[in-house]
Amino acid sequence: MAMVVGVAMGNIALGAETVGQINEAYKTKPMLKKPLDECSMRYKTIVDVDVHTAIISIKGNPKFAEGAVVDAGVEASICEGGFTKGQSPLTSLTQRMEKICDVTRAIIRMLL
C-alpha cells in the first residue's frame, strides 16, 4: 500500500506541475484559452478528487482506488484531445500522467 500512496503522491506533484504549465500557457498561448480552461478544470479534478480518492480508498476498498486512478488517466487524455493536433503545450506532461496512472492501476490490481 505504501507504494501506491507514493505513486499517488507522484500524481499529485505531476498534476500540480501541469496546472502550473497551464497557467504559463495562458500567458504565452492566449489563442488556446478554451482548451486550456478545459485542461485546468480536468487537472484540478485529478489533483483534488481522483488522487485524494485513490489514497483514501486504497486501505478500505482498492476497487474504488482503481476507479479513481482510471478516471485520472481519462481526464488527462480528454485534456490532450481538446487541442488541435500538434498544438498542445501539455503533451509530454499528459503522456507522463497517463503512464503513471497505468502503473498505479497495475499495482492496485495486484492488491485486489
Image (tube, rainbow, N blue to C red):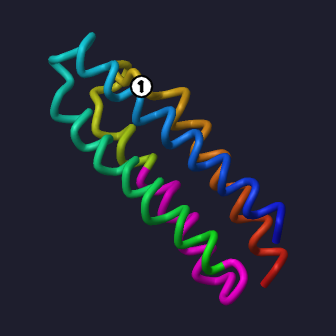
Q: Residue furthest top?
A: 28
Q: Residues within 10 Å of mark 1 (few under 14, many from 20)?
A: some
Could you say which is closer to the camera, residue 52 or residue 62?
52
Image vertical order of residue 95 relative to residue 41, above or below: above
**Residue at left offset 58%, top offset 81%:** 64
Question: Which residue is identified by label 1?
Answer: 21
Residue type at the position of mark 1: Gln
On screen, residue 17 versus residue 100, left or right, reads left
On screen, residue 55 versus residue 15, left or right, reads right
- Magenta span covers which residues? 58-75
Position of residue 8 measured from the top left corner of the image (x, y, whole percent): 66, 57
**Main SS category, magenta section:** helix
Could you say which is closer to the camera, residue 107 or residue 86?
107
**Residue at left offset 84%, top offset 75%:** 110
> Is 65 colored magenta in this rendering?
yes
Quarter of the image with the N terminus is: bottom right
Classify mark 1: helix, strand or loop: helix
Q: Based on the displayed image, in which of its 4 quarters is residue 111 positioned?
A: bottom right
Could you say which is closer to the camera, residue 91 or residue 44?
44
Q: Residue furthest bottom?
A: 60
On screen, residue 92 versus residue 31, left or right, reads right
Image vertical order of residue 61 relative to residue 3, above or below: below
Position of residue 4 measured from the top left corner of the image (x, y, whole percent): 76, 63
Position of residue 43 measured from the top left corner of the image (x, y, whole percent): 40, 47
